[in-house]
Amino acid sequence: MVFKLVKREHASQWMLLVTPLLAVLLSIVVSSLLLVILGKPVLLTMHSFFIAPFENFYSITEVFLKFGPLLLIAQALAVGFRAKVWNIGAEGQMIIGAICASAVPVYFVDSTSGWMLPAMALLGAIGGMAWAGIAAFLKTRFNANEILVTLMLSAIALQLLYYLLLGPWKDPMGFNFPQTVMFQDEALFAPLFSGVRLNTSIFIPIAFTIAVWLLMEKHFAGFKLEVGGQAPDAATYAGFSAKKAVWVSLLLAGFAAGIAGMSEVAGPIGQLQRSVTSGYGYAGIIVAYLGALHPIGIVFAAFFLAVLQIGGDVALVSADLPISAVQVFQGLLLIFYLSVYTLVNYRLQPARTEKTASQGVSS
Amino acid sequence: MLRVSNLQHANAVIKPLSKHTHTLLSLRDITKRYPSVVANDSINLDVHNGSIHAVLGENGAGKSTLMKLVYGMVEADSGTMHWDGELVQLKNSAAARKLGIGMVFQHFSLFETLSVVENISLTMPGSRTELAEKIKTIGERYQLVVNPNASVHALSVGERQRVEIIRCLMQDLKLLILDEPTSVLPPQHIQSLFDALRKLRDSGVAILFISHKLDEIRDLCDTATILRDGRVAGTVNPKETTTKELATLMIGREVPHIQSQRDTVQAANTVLRLNKLSAKNPDPFGTSLSDIDLHVKQHEIVGIAGVSGNGQQELSRIISGEWRPKTLSPDAIEMFGQRVSNMDPTQRRNLGFSFVPEERLGRGAVPPMSLNRNALLTAFSQGILNRGFIRKKKLSDFTDRCIADFDVRCGGNNAIASSLSGGNLQKYIIGRELMLKPNLLFVAQPTWGVDIGAATAIRQRLLDLRDQGIGVLIISEEIEELFEVTDRLYVINGGKLSPSLVTADVTPNDVGEYMIATHSTDSAQPEAHAHGV
């Protein structure tokens, strides 16, 4: 029996709200099953994932440390996704942002100027935007598919990072580890509380969220982006530029990812090293969708995924889980979200093959 | 799978040519519900062999659903279908074809890059030479002449339609269903189609002819069943019924009339001028525009007639500014005396130009967005924005005024555009564009898919606008509509425009001549495509 998807005439609004919750529930059920198969303690693992992150102050600050970059990147990606610009290379844009920001402390090792941090933020933003701008240029000039271009640019960015860390930027006193010197305090964000890694950079994603909310919900520019995504012909008819939408979407994402990369090297990491992105660029895609591409939904989604990552770290130790367990859970989450979303908006109907055959030929 | 009873078989053999010998198709109490609408409600329909049976009704009356039921593409919720006296249940259209039912859709299903015989060989067994021979025989017998080796993209719409009909005739055809077959044809080709259909009928085939054009039905059909709101409103002999009676049956009340008090106007300014406009279409199957001269003055309605696909799409996009070819000369398009070739749609709108495109959903309006947000699409310059931020109150005021002034039936300013009927959405879009207070209004297909009531209201509104001094340009494929409202006419054909014609001085047939003039249409094409034989 072959099935086909038929769009529902009235997808209920509250179902759209239920969708992420249902996806979370299904992911928990399926991963519990996997845990049972693996012979791991289910309850302990669930406790580690969802309760342990809130059991002490330090863990809570760690959750917010992860929350920041996820929120920042997901907000920017969601703007692009609503305009149907599929930038999946935030990872690469984040790497380039981190590299450009790191250039300042790498070349001014002894500087104690107060301009260090602003200069790093500026360079990080410019780097991320330039990297995303390549995809925007290729898309608008040659109609090159931005999915492929941004993905491949991420691979290039990673190789560039490796080259710098193994070559010119390697810390001469670093026992040959592929990393730069530790940055001086002037190149780091100040911690919010003593003894924790959470720092003042957390305010950037929050401010950015408000800006994106204003843009998408209240401003004409956001409306133009959305029309371009939902009905390109209507955008042309109205006189909105499709090219501008591509540029705005990609540059915004490049900006956010660049700043996120800068916040990592100027924050918890304190130097440039291989694992500078912690996978935020890709996780941001999941967050954007889990938040239904809505600025407020994304706040919750980013928080949830941050909890999941900290919880995963706990579970590694307490429940002796393999390191890939968190990734499996994240993957399940996205798959279930997309399936539930599809079934909320479409219904499954047995396909009548003869009918399609008779109508299959069209001029 | 179906056995014809001996008696009927004998009947058919003895009197194959006489009319009304027996009931070929009989529908009883057919009902089909969709989630939001009952498309067919207890429909009874009898079709006799050797007769042309019209199914008449407005948009949304349930004609297409009923035909799809007969053709096996849709299954009825309840009711019975008898074929030659036997109860049948069609699972799919292949089963319908096996019974001898053929259908020609409004949108043809032909591959443009293949030749006629190649297209037919996709669905018919037999070698291409045999098929080509058969196409010629059928063509001669029913006056459906078409060159089997011609490429489909080189054929006119009328010829493509013939290919579709021939494809149905290649099998043992008993019932032919035609969905609005004349809506795509110029007047001259309509008569030759009718001649062919009459020949078919006389050979014993039953024809179901779907249309909303009353004169045609009275000219061609032996019986007419009128559908209204999914029910049968009546079955009549159209030759003994006046057009007015038919129309009243169709819409359930008397047809409203449109009026205009036209004053003689002096010294009108030219609001739109195209000067030798030429533009090459990058799409190899699209139409290129060449040497187009056109002007529209204040106080007049100018129409562009033509068979679809002759450059209307391209011309409308180039006038609206949606398509701005780099090669366009700077003075090719002038609005209100200004050169606008390089201006984008927003800039042209700011000069006093408004445009209603032919596709309402997806171009004139964003389907999943509310009417409020759709108002923003073009009305954003009407004091609705404050430094780019949307002023909610101003926006909903604008939408409410549009809904009230233009009688848009909808669930308020937050209704989703795609939830409106075609006519109401068209009224909304025209309303929105008129609220921009244009001096030049351009409407493509003003009443496409719009019911008679709304269509009359729209035409009346266009005449009122002209009387107020606005220059109006309309593109339409409905000749009747153009003759009803325009002062002057151009005909577009193969990307070229005819000279300006004064509507009062020409007949629909004159216009039809221009529609097909230089087309390499009717006769078989001499430069036969040798490949594929």
Image: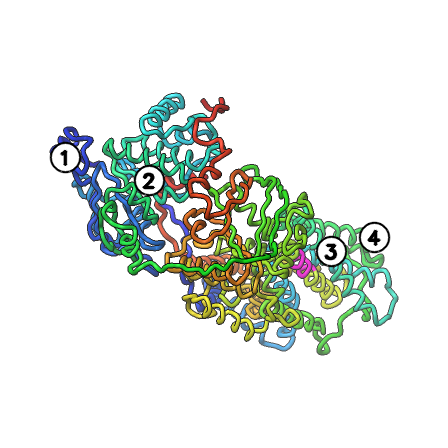
Q: Position of residue A26 (x, y in %)?
A: 45, 62
Cα separation, mark 3 vs mark 4, equals 22 Å
What amino acid does circle 2 point to?
Met
Cα separation, mark 1 vs mark 4, equals 95 Å
What amino acid does circle 3 point to?
Ala
Q: Is residue B509 above or below residue B462?
A: above
Chain bearing tag 1 is B
Cα separation, mark 1 vs mark 2, equals 24 Å
Q: Are dots 3 and 1 in contact, CB under 8 Å?
A: no
Within 10 angstroms of label 3, few (less than 14), some, or many (20 or more) residues? many
Cα separation, mark 3 vs mark 2, equals 57 Å
| Residue B499 placement, left or right of B202 | right
Badges 1 and 4, same chain:
no
Residue in the foreground of this view, choosing between A48 and B242: B242
Residue in the foreground of this view, choosing between B403 and A31: B403
Q: What segment is highlighted magenta in the picture? A: A247-254
Cα separation, mark 3 vs mark 1, equals 80 Å
Q: Which residue is mark 2?
A: B103
Report if residue A35 is visible in the image. Answer: no
Within 10 angstroms of label 4, few (less than 14), some, or many (20 or more) residues? few
Q: Secondary structure at mark 4?
A: loop
What amino acid does circle 4 point to?
Pro
Q: Which residue is mark 3?
A: A130
Residue farthest right in this picture: A110
Cα separation, mark 2 vs mark 4, equals 73 Å
